[in-house]
Each structure stands twice: as structure tokens, then as C-alpha cells.
Image (cartoon, rainbow, N blue to C red):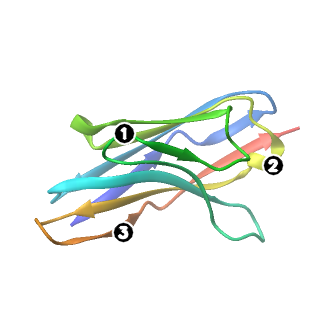
Amino acid sequence: QVQLVESGGGLVQAGGSLRLSCAASGSIFSINTMGWYRQAPGKQRERVATSSSGGSTNYADSVKGRFTISRDNAKNTVYLQMNSLKPEDTAVYYCHAIIYTGVTVSRVYWGLGTQVTVSS
């Protein structure tokens, strides 16, 4: 059984910062991509940032220069540092990971989500 547990969401004023964390636990052989998605009310879930096992990162255009994704592979944890937050960043943020539970067995896992609310 593999779980992703997020933490760090909350309420912040526009211009403020938050740091999200997501820890993977369970029967993990290895982790490929880890990342963050978000879903605002009435909108589709969208990719925010991803980090490959090789260290490459990708960001949505809307967060480039403001958000930074990082990983601690020893702890199976991914972080999202969010600076200069805007009201339009308000959403439920979901952790996402492609996890191998065996040499050739992998699937996508999702966390339950953490609410980020940015007030104007």
C-alpha cells in the first residue's frame, strides 16, 4: 500500500508565501516523477509543477518565477515553495507521483489534496 500525504496548505494574503510538502510512504521500490496539480472550483485539474527522478523540472506558465518544486529523494518527499501568491492561485493542491512498487510495476498515485486560499 502506497500513500501520498500532503501538508502545508492554508490561508494567506496576496503576495504571501506557502510551502507545501508531500511525503510518499509504503511499499515503494522507486519513484519516477513527482509533482503538484491544482483544481479551482468549477475548473479542471491542472498541472502546476513536476520533478523527474533525474532532476528536471517543469512549470505551468502561470506559476513560473513564483513557484519552485524540489525533492528529497531520501525522504520520498516533494515540496512546492509558493511565493508572490495571487488570488487566482486559490485551489486544492494535489500531490502526484509515478511510483514503482516492483521492478516493472508502476502506477500513478494521488494525495487527498490540501486547500490553498489566497485573499486579496
Residue 14 horizontal/vertical position (percent): 81, 33
Q: Amino acid at mark 1?
A: Gly
* Disc 1 secondary structure class: loop
| Horizontal side, residue 97 vs residue 67: left or right | left
Identify the residue under disc 2: 88
In front of the other: 77 or 48: 48
- The residue lying furthest to the right in this view is 120
Q: Residue 60 at what x, y percent from top left?
A: 65, 50
Question: For mark 1, what is the residue?
Answer: 55
Mark 3 vs mark 1: which is more N-terminal?
A: 1
Q: Which residue is mark 3?
A: 108
Pinpoint residue 82: horizontal percent, then vertical percent.
63, 34
- The mark found on residue 27 in the picture is none
Q: Residues within 10 Å of mark 1 (few under 14, many from 20)?
A: few
The residue under the point 75% across, 69% down is: 43
Residues at circles 2 and 3 in contact by the CB criterion of under 8 Å: no
Q: Secondary structure at mark 3?
A: strand
Q: Nearer the viewer, residue 79 or 32?
A: 32
C-alpha span from label 3 to label 1: 19 Å
